[in-house]
Amino acid sequence: MASLRYHVLVTVLLSIMAPGLATAQSDVIYDTTMATPVDSVPLKPTRFTLYDRRTITRIQTFHWNQGKGAKPGSIALQGKDKKLFGPWVAKGKTNEKGLVNAYWEVTPNQPLEAGTYTVLDSEPGTWSRNPTKGNVGIVRIVGQQGAVVPENVQPPAVDSATEADPTLTLEQQQVRAEQLFEQIRQADRYDYEQIEALYLQLIDECPDTEQAEESYFRLSNLYRIGMDPPEYFKLRRLLEDYLSRYVDTELAEKMRQRLLRLYEDTGQWQGAVELRDSTIADLSLENSHYLVIMLDYARALEGAGERDRALSIYRQVEKTAGGEQAADYDMSDLWLRVARNRIQMIGLIQAQKWDEVARLYREQFSKMAFVEMPQIQELLEYADALERIGDRSSAIAQYRQVMRTDQGHQTLQGQQASARLIELVGVDWHE
């Protein structure tokens, strides 16, 4: 099948990333390249730790991007204290299979003290992730011991304050935060670029103030509802950064829920599963939202490709919604039908009864109101069933509907639909 050929191709691509990167006098400091299928958009910050002083001589990130590569942008490093190194302008590298801009590479020759650093790629939407290493970005970092800085040091992409003033005291941070808040208040309310820059500056310079947390919250609102279309990638990075910095604050749970909804709205199912995994064990039957939470969990599991686990959750919902406690939950009859529909459909798919799958989805979609929207997993299953029963033209139309629903978020379902369209039509669906 096309998906198998896609995985084999990516395996080959990743297996050839290593040659030519490290030099004889340099050591590989951090490497997440592996011979494994990859998706785009890292789900966790990509961090590495130095235990002694090093000079970073080369950084290379991988941008498979569904076989299209990506126009090079920039790569930067950020210390635990939020001090920024770079960003450096990346050069695109063609792999041995001829994929242009498959790799982005910089040679910063940047001395770094011992500590933990985060890799920042300017285009996370096309940056590949490694599922076997916690879904961090695929990157290879090479360096030398000590603080040796070779000649021809590569300049940064922008004027960055890599030699910034020492960290401000809390009192100085509070004064500076008030100054920045005043600038924000005086800014044109529609000058989103300036407002965004001021909030980011406050977060960077005044991390220990209450205003910093408020800036995260306000900026997340700007990315979600102030921008058209919403800045989903910036929002994801912002929320993940907040939760890595402020773990047990009063605002943390709200930001965690905001990140969870973002993962679910953009089809980043593995991230949604990981967030729900951390709370689902403590979910009580006494919770009035138990059925809805469990159904959302099952949906995320399906989206991440974990159908068997999802099926067990649907059965738990069916048992609870159809049992003696059903009256304890709002709309339990509706949730019972949802669970049973998914149980039935998964059973038909596992039994490979494709005619029945296609018939049921045809009926289901025809009865939907104009404003209703099928789940992307359902659309993909319908398209697959149509293809298997020989209705090629309808299958192509449905695979394209999957891509429209994907909205460029590169979900697992979107990637699978794209691979099938390339196989069936011979070109990328956008063409």
Image (tube, rainbow, N blue to C red):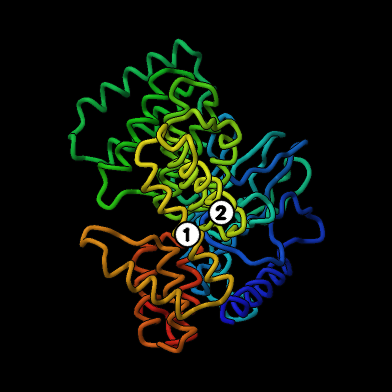
If the image is split into quadrants, where does the N terminus sit? bottom right
Residue 289 in the image, given as x and y percentages of width and height: 42, 35
Q: Is residue 88 visible?
A: no
Tell me where residue 6 sits by quadrant: bottom right
Which residue is located at x 44 percent, y 13 percent? 172
Residue 334 in the image, given as x and y percentages of width and height: 36, 48
Give the left or right position of residue 275, taking residue 141 as reference: left
Q: Earlier in the sequence, mark 2 or mark 1?
A: 2
Which residue is located at x 69 percent, y 60 percent? 33
Task: Identify which amino acid the numbered label 1 is placed on.
Answer: Arg
User: Dot 2: few (<14), some (14–19), or many (≥20) neighbours within 10 Å?
Assistant: many
Tag 2 and tag 1, C-beta contact below 8 Å: yes
Furthest-top residue in view?
171
Residue that badge 1 annotates: 342
Task: Identify which amino acid the numbered label 2 is placed on.
Answer: Ala
Between marks 2 and 1 in the image, the one whose residue lies nearer the viewer: 1
Q: Is residue 177 visible?
A: yes
Using the numbered discs, state the Cα–Cα distance from disc 2 to disc 1 in whole angstroms: 9 Å
Q: Is residue 146 above or below residue 186?
A: below
Q: Is residue 334 above or below residue 392?
A: above
Residue that badge 2 annotates: 310
Residue 326: which disc?
none
- SS category of the residue bearing label 2: helix
Closer to us: 319 or 24: 319
Which residue is located at x 46 percent, y 78 percent? 385
User: Dot 1: few (<14), some (14–19), or many (≥20) neighbours within 10 Å?
Assistant: some
If the image is split into quadrants, where does the C terminus sit? bottom left
Residue 80 in the image, given as x and y percentages of width and height: 60, 32
Closer to us: 93 or 321: 321
Give the left or right position of residue 281, taking residue 175 as reference: right
